[in-house]
Image (cartoon, grey):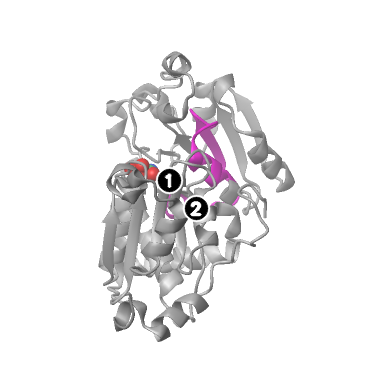
Amino acid sequence: MRGGALTGAASFCARVTLMQHVIRSQQFDRKTIEKLFALATQLQTAPDDSLRGKVMATLFYEPSTRTRLSFESAMTRLGGGVISTENAREASSAMKGETLEDTIKIVNQYADVIVLRHFEAGSALHAAQVSQIPIINAGDGAGQHPTQALLDLYTIERELGKVDGIHIAGVGDLRFGRTIRSLSYLLGKFKDVRMTFVSPPELQMGDDIKAYLKRNNVAFSETENLASAMKSADVVYQTRIQKERFPDVEEYERLKDSFIITRSLVDSMKRKAILMHPLPRVNEIEREVDSSPHAMYFKQAGYGVLVRMALLKMLLGGKELLPIPRVPASHNLHGNV
Ligand code: CP
């Protein structure tokens, strides 16, 4: 297909020049994060339709409510268009045997950016390797979820006024939970951050993240004492036990009710401390907690629109915006920057 705004040579060249991918948290440096957050806050009050004429494809091979809809909301608010396959595993030609690589090459003909959620760790990097337009990793299996980490960090910055010096307790499924993995990578960019990991032994944080934290001078400890962690943390980051990642259903059943956050636990938090959760929740935060002033998870999800607007604008909006550092081609998924 040739001609028209979608595939004209000029717009294709412009896309290639500005091409960046968002694959994992480590690729963001502190300067880029600060620029992104300033833009996100600006976009909250300043109407902006600078992406008029651009098209975003959301290609989701796993279920989603927040990530897909907030990206679609973000693009729509910036004046752009959206094409979408929300259940790509069954409702796209993947069902007929098409490879992810071929699908990416095809969607390159229809869109200016692809937001990809896939069930395999490493899939976003593979997609980026064959894509001429930006790929945004919207969650790849138990790998990473970098845009969730960015909105999590933005929530901390907005609600606490800083990231340097905070004590954050990560709770629940730290083994399969990609959001806390990605957030840990981002926290390594800040000063004097301390982490407490609260999980059953079977769901402890991976050695790759712990090695990264050590290299980046983030002090961390591991415990099963949730009550103590909640009393001392500035941020409690609860996570869902990731049923879909367990090879053994019986192990999931045994562990699924580990570390439920109750109203009395939340009432013991420091006055300005916040309780976050990437959502969806099952029963790991009791409903009575929702009315607590510490409960930040619904507001956190709302911040996702602002952060994703800023990200889309940085990727597609023009040369004057600070480019997002590229993922070096030689890096594998867990390469540490
Ligand atoms: N936090 C998050 O990724 O939510 P969804 O699975 O609903 O997108």
Q: Residue at x 33, y 39 (%)?
A: 293
Q: Which picture quadrant has residue 276?
A: top left
Residue 30 position within the rendered picture, expressed as x and y whole percent measured from the top left: 59, 61
Q: Nearer the viewer, residue 115 or 312?
A: 115
- Does dot 2 land on a helix, a strand or a loop? helix
Asked if residue 16 lies left or right of residue 290, the reply is: right
Which residue type does callout 1 highlight? His
Q: Residue at x 63, y 49 (%)?
A: 188
Which region is colored magenta?
Answer: 155-184
Give residue 160's position: percent from left, percent from top. Answer: 46, 50
**Ligand 1 neighbours mark 1 (CB distance < 8 Å):** no
**Apparent side of residue 189 relative to residue 144 in the rendered image (left or right):** right
What residue would you read off at disc 2? 124
Q: Residue at x 26, y 65 (%)?
A: 76
Mark 1: which secondary structure? strand
Q: Nearer the viewer, residue 106 or 333?
A: 106
